[in-house]
Image (spheres, grey):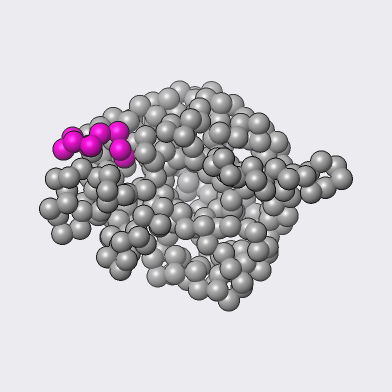
């Protein structure tokens, strides 16, 4: 999916919602466990209930890898079930030496056909550039994450001018591609970082996890992170998919997604 196509979906749906499909077999409603593939059945019903409000879906691959080969099958079926006009993110946080990164890229872009994959930049350019060789695919680079341990390294001062490590990562990695193939992960619980990051990369999309269950605030994220075209994908996982654990889970997920979309529509009117 191109940047323009993503903009068009945001405008059409009046939404920049990304639904995280962090599907835990131990948390889905018990009645689904009777299905041959309960993870896919859960995802299928979540997608049916939320696709009109979402512009992206983000399966976290760890939840599928934990189920072995069957989990990968569930992930592939989920990916194929997502409507073609919705952006797909493999939240896999991959990266390695160049030839290994090339294999990761082939796995997620050629074999599974995701639109994008999250990548850890710690090993530098040769670990990231293989992902950038694929046309109309996106690399989403971890920058300033929302987990408490992210502060262990990301905020270390690395320059005489007070530059922090996450800022160095963004500044350097932005040279490897452009706003048409690189996005950045910035946690919703890091509003103090958002404003500076947006100044550094005014045109790039930012993927924002942490709204909802992790305590991030949508209005604050938009205040500091939006650009003139929106430029945000705001992810909600647990706050949507686990909003109810009864047989009405899908309806509840749809209502939760709709509530966020309504708020997003109001924010977009101000652009």
Q: Quadrant of residue 266?
A: top left
| Image position of 94 with respect to 47: above or below | below
Name above or below for residue 215 compared with residue 40. above
Q: Is residue 84 visible?
A: yes
What residue is rendered at 41% in x and 49% in y? Answer: 58
Relative image position of residue 155 (x, y in whole percent): 70, 43
Left or right placement of residue 66 versus residue 45 in this view? right
Residue 23 to residue 36: above or below:
above
Of 193 and 10, the residue lying toward us: 193
Q: Is residue 185 left or right of residue 29?
A: right
Q: Quadrant of the C terminus?
A: top right
Residue 205 appears in the picture as rendered = no
- Residue at horizontal 32%, vertical 30%? 256
Tell which of 209 and 57 is nearer to you: 209
Q: Nearer the viewer, residue 138 or 154?
A: 154
Q: What residue range appears in magenta? A: 241-249
The chief SS type of the magenta part is loop
Would residue 67 appear left or right of 2 to someone viewing this image?
left
**What x and y, as percent, mark residue 195?**
67, 33
- Residue 38 screen position, x and y as percent: 20, 53
Instruction: Say if the magenta span includes residue 247.
Output: yes
Q: Residue at x 81, y 41 (%)?
A: 162
Q: Is residue 248 magenta?
A: yes
Residue that lies at the very extreme toward the bottom in this rendered image: 99
């Amino acid at each position: 999916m191109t940047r323009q196509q993503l903009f068009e979906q945001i405008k059409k749906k009046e939404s920049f919602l990304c639904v995280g499909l962090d599907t835990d077999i131990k948390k889905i409603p018990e009645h689904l466990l009777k299905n041959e593939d309960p993870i896919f059945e859960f995802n299928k019903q979540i997608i049916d209930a939320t696709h009109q409000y979402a512009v992206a879906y983000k399966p976290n691959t760890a939840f599928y890898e934990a189920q072995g080969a069957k989990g990968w099958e569930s992930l592939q079926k989920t990916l194929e079930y997502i409507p073609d006009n919705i952006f797909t993110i493999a939240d896999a946080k991959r990266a390695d030496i160049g030839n290994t990164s090339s294999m990761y890229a082939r796995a997620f872009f050629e074999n599974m056909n995701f639109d994008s994959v999250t990548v850890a930049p710690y090993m530098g350019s040769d670990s990231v550039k293989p992902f950038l060789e694929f046309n109309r695919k996106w690399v989403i680079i971890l920058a300033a994450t929302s987990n408490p341990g992210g502060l262990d390294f990301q905020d270390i001062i690395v320059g005489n001018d007070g530059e922090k490590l996450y800022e160095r990562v963004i500044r350097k990695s932005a040279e490897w591609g452009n706003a048409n193939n690189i996005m950045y992960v910035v946690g919703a619980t890091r509003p103090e970082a958002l404003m500076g990051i947006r100044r550094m990369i005014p045109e790039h999309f930012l993927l924002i996890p942490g709204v909802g269950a992790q305590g991030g605030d949508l209005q604050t994220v938009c205040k500091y992170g939006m650009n003139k075209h929106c430029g945000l994908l705001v992810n909600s996982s647990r706050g949507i998919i686990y909003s109810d654990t009864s047989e009405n889970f899908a309806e509840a997920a749809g209502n939760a997604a709709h509530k966020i979309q309504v708020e997003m529509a109001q924010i977009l009117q101000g652009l």
